[in-house]
Amino acid sequence: MAEATITSKGQVTIPADIRRNQGLHAGVRLSFTPMPDGSILLRAKTRSILDLKGILKPAPGVIVSIDDMRLT
């Protein structure tokens, strides 16, 4: 089990083996989510919203252009 200590400035160094294992590097943003049981979920935000482009396929049927959707 890896451990870290919080500095007087509130900083934590994530152990090197954890960084390597999770592919973390300088500049990766982390999110902290408090859980009801008192634990904290730590997630690396390694994906951009742009990574979702093309993930959804259009529904079969009528295709409507954006211009047709606009109210004029």
Image (tube, rainbow, N blue to C red):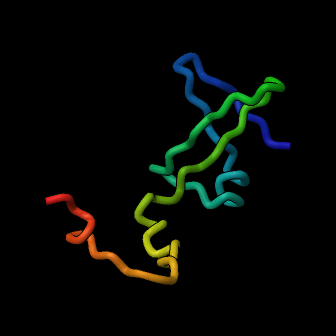
- In the current view of this chain or complex, which residue is farthest to the left? 72
- In the current view of this chain or complex, which residue is farthest to the top? 8
How many marks do you count on the picture? 0
Q: Is residue 44 left or right of residue 60?
A: right
Q: Position of residue 63 (x, y in %)?
A: 37, 80
Q: Position of residue 4 (x, y in %)?
A: 72, 33
Q: Position of residue 1 (x, y in %)?
A: 86, 43
Residue under the image location 83 percent in, 26 percent down: 37
Q: Is residue 61 above or below residue 68?
A: below
Q: Is residue 63 above or below residue 39?
A: below
Q: Position of residue 61 (x, y in %)?
A: 47, 83
Residue under the image location 72 percent in, 54 percent down: 17
Q: Is residue 51 left or right of residue 33?
A: left
User: Where on the picture, by quarter, is residue 72?
Assistant: bottom left
Residue under the image location 21 percent in, 62 percent down: 70
Give the camera-side residue of 28 and 70: 70
Give the camera-side residue of 22 and 44: 44
Give the camera-side residue of 15 and 64: 64
User: Where on the picture, by quarter, is residue 7?
Assistant: top right
- In the current view of this chain or complex, which residue is farthest to the right? 1
Give the camera-side residue of 37 and 62: 62
